[in-house]
Amino acid sequence: MGMLDPIKGFGVTFSTMFKKVVTEEYPEVFYPTAPRYHGRHQLNRHPDGLEKCVGCELCAWACPADAIFVEGADNTEEERYSPGERYGKNYQINYLRCIGCGLCIEACPTRSLTMLNFYELADDDRQKLIYTKEDLLAPLLPGMEAPPHPMRLGDDEQDYYVRGPELARQAGQDRQSSEVSAQ
Amino acid sequence: MTLAHQKPSETAQTEVPEGHVRLTIDGQEVIAPKGELVIRTAERMGIVIPRFCDHPLLDPAGACRQCLVEVSMGGRPMPKPQASCTITVADGMEVKTQLTSPVADKAQKGVMELLLINHPLDCPICDKGGECPLQNQAMAHGRTDSRFVDRKRTFPKPLKISTQILLDRERCVLCQRCTRFSQQIAGDPFIDLLERGAQQQIGTSETAELEKSASHTPDGTPFQSYFSGNTIQICPVGALTSAQYRFRSRPFDLVSSPSVCEHCSSGCAERTDFRRGRIMRKLAGDDPDVNEEWICDKGRFAFRYTTARDRIRKPLVRGEDGELHEASWPEAMRLAAEALLKARDGKGIGVLTGGRLTLEDAYAYQKFARVAARTNDIDFRARAHSAEELQFLAAQVAGTTPEHVSFASLEKAPIVLCVAFEPEDEAPIVFLRLRKAARKMGTRVAFVGQWTTSSVRKTSGELLACEPGGEAAALDGIAEHAKDIVEALSAEGAVILVGERAATMPGLFAAVQRLAERTGARVAWIPRRAGERGALDAGAVPTLLPGGAPVTDAGARAALEKLWRLPEGSLPAEPGRDTAGILAAAAAGELDALVVGGVDPDDLPDPRAAREALDKVGFVLSLEMRPSAVTERADVVLPIAPTAEKAGTFRNWEGRDRPFEVTLQNTGAVPDCRVLDTLAVEMDVDLFTQTPKAARADFVRAANSVTRPAATPVEAAPEAEQAKAETNGHVKLSTWRQLIDNGSLQVEEPHLAGTARPAVLRLNEATAQRHGIVPGEPATIRTERGELSFPAEIADLPDDVVWVPSRSPVGVYEALGVGHGGLVQLSAGTAAGAESAEGPAGETGGAA
Ligand code: SF4
Ligand code: SF4
Ligand code: FES
């Protein structure tokens, strides 16, 4: 055992002091994720505010961690949540289970379920980590109306799906122009 | 018939037995019975040929073409692929399925592609997704992309065939399973193929004027079937769905558990699918001996009573304020036990069990009555009943097994005579068997009844019409007016079926027995409720011990005392009172307490007297699931488990045990037998019926330790001899319950209720004219007690007889105070009290 050995041990420490730090000052400084990062889910809406989810449970079926629970129900003329006959009445994602694999959003046939970059999914209460439909639904953008309400963009669900991209573009333009006029 | 499994080399040497042929399938030699379909022979060999329309219980149709195979006969290939579900085996036939023949494979792929051209591929919102033969086959053998670029044919969807059955025509693959089921098995005017080519669709004759008339059949009568749910189950795609289950869950959510139907005495095998502790749907189980693969709509759709909002989940005790309050089990038990002990040592306790118990629960009730309450005052018959009936049950029914009469023997019988029994309404699966027997085996079906009901029509039956109440006389006179029927009944295997309504007619059971003795025909009793037959065998009657020995038999009592470890001579020896007797005694203050299971006073011949008795008697203990007329009057209410939450056995009308296990585990609900056992312990008596299993073992020991006496002749009740009552202007009432009505197990099922038969008053043309009644317009029947109105309909009843349903929705006994065979006044128009906005109601009758 050489005399310098105890000091040698600090070699790494000293040399690191002069390198660029890798530590992130989270949560004081928020660092953005990669653009395709699999964060929290969102249930999207059609441009008129109707929900895209049809309660098909394909996401729940695809989920390898059994984190998703869905219950479908019928839309009625008086109470319509999505175009077409079926909507997701109950929707829950358990973030204690979710592994962020994204298989659910691949399975979703209506692009209702997508993922955000939001990753602050921690809590000291298990119950609070089971996100319900209210937590997951996308916010109402200008021009959107909270369901239940009748179909505003067509006579049946075909109009919503076949003309989907066009409707989205249109809604985007309307929104922009309304924002302009608001200014 | 498992010759198919023999090795080819062996078969080559084996002789082909009589009535069989030798053929090869995919190069394997096989011997098959003549007339067998190629698809079945292949199935037996383990070769799966894809199919949609083929169903073993339906006649072959060859509609979907998915099962194409290559066939050559004696080395000469047939020019085109053949449908293996319609072609029968032949000697020297050579079959090549998709496994060995590229031709068959290509043909099948082509059919699949064509089937999918107009299919909407809306699997994500389709109920069948995940258990769909079309989906499976498309995934296994279909193309991954579509070559069809044009617009798909679409239909407005869904089409409401009834309140329950919905049809998405664009999903349909036109296999015609549904239409064949309706025509062949159920015999109901349902739906059929319409149009041609790409527009071919399932529908009704009026689907042109779609929405409104969709639920009407060609002759304009509303679509109505008791078996419509089966079409959903056999539809190989999601074209037919039920309003009840639509969008509720996915196959992978469901836990399936085999179960037994709790509704009628057929005892159908079912599969109950539940999700997170809630039943989502019921499907028909496959039991060739009992229900084959079918169940009725009541068995399929009536189950939400278990989750009814008002279900009683905690014991209730009537407080000082006269209201029921929740109490703990120990407290409720203590109160009940104290009151019952006092009553037992006072004037006594009566036990009414109701007809919906399992064998185990019924056994616990009778043991409770005999051992804890020390009485024979116990009766399961919560309906019209008679001493003559009890005699008949003791002599002819108790202890019989399916060897006596079974579903299979109905098929083999040369003739089946139904007496006071309407199979389609009372035991729908018996009806399906009778129809099958009539269609396939040429069984003659005859009915002693009042009019050509749909059961009569659909079994190609003969009606021996008689006045209500005149059934006994009709049977006695059958030798004169229907000689051929007596002759047929004398043949080997003939069967007489008696329904529960027979108890309302004095002398009928005696007449049935006389006829059976004269002809040698076998007699079977088919009660309406699932628990009646088991309750009889368990001894929940005033005159019989478990196992069918009479209570007056000292030897049997001694044997049971030994088995139950009771002091000698402690079992009551006197026959007890029947339901009516118990209620009368309670009203007269001759009983101090009543223990009541699932009894609805409106089912009894005198509902008012029953309610009065419950009001008057000192103490009422009610074991119930939901609030009822009994709980309203009870001092202590103990909640019990519905069928899905307990294990047990229903003994069906054949005497066949239909055991089932718990479907929904750990709900905290306890079966009657456990409640009674604990209650008895509080009363210082051991019943040993803590669990259904224990109760069952005890029952088997008890039944084996006594001997059933030889059948004794049934004596006709004295009333039978009475001169015919003067009718003076009255008409006679014929009535029975329809399958779907206001029964207490059918609550919270609006879609099912919508498929009930409309409640109408039926009468013949002459009677209608005499009373100025116009078909379709309301008519009223009344007695001193009250009146009932229904729209009138003409049917072939005898003169001066009317028919109404017993509880659709109002109870006939409650409203009129008379039942089948009673006298009522008839007039046009609605009831005086009832408001009527319907057009010219005619005169409102005299005695308003
Ligand atoms: S989010 Fe998408 S996949 Fe999940 S239930 Fe809704 S529609 Fe179906
Ligand atoms: S509705 Fe279903 S059962 Fe009926 S023909 Fe179409 S696919 Fe077959
Ligand atoms: S299964 Fe043979 S044609 Fe349909």
Image (tube, coloured by chain):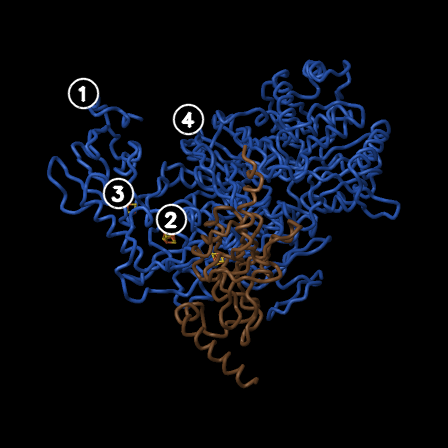
Chain colours: A brown, B blue
Measure the C-alpha gap from mark 4 to mark 1.
41 Å
According to the picture, the residue beneath numbered tag 3 turns out to be B86
Of callouts 1 and 3, which one flags the residue occurring earlier in the amino acid sequence? 1
**Residue B236: which numbered mark, if any?**
2
Instruction: Say above or below: B576 vs B754.
Output: above
Question: B367 and B159: which one is in front?
Answer: B159
- Mark 3–mark 4 contact, CB under 8 Å? no
Disc 2: CA contacts within 10 A as few (<14), some (14-19) or many (>=20): many
Cβ at disc 3 under 8 Å from ligand 3: yes
Q: Is residue B455 left or right of residue B442?
A: right
Cβ at disc 2 under 8 Å from ligand 2: yes
Q: Are marks 2 and 4 on the same chain?
A: yes
* Residue B562: image location, x then y, percent: 71, 13
Question: In terms of secondary structure, where does tag 4 sit?
Answer: loop
Could you tell me which residue is drawn at 45 percent across and 34 percent down? B287
Three-letter amino acid code at the position of disc 2: Pro
Residue at mark 4: chain = B
**Residue A99: which numbered mark, if any?**
none
According to the picture, the residue beneath numbered tag 1 turns out to be B13
Instruction: Say above or below: B699 vs B120.
Output: above
According to the picture, the residue beneath numbered tag 4 turns out to be B492
Residue at mark 1: chain = B
Cβ at disc 1 under 8 Å from ligand 3: no
Residue at mark 2: chain = B
* Residue A73: image location, x then y, percent: 54, 58
* Residue B105: image location, x then y, percent: 22, 45
Which mark lies nearer to you, 4 or 1?
1
Question: B464 and A90: which one is in front?
Answer: A90
Question: B467 and A136: which one is in front?
Answer: A136
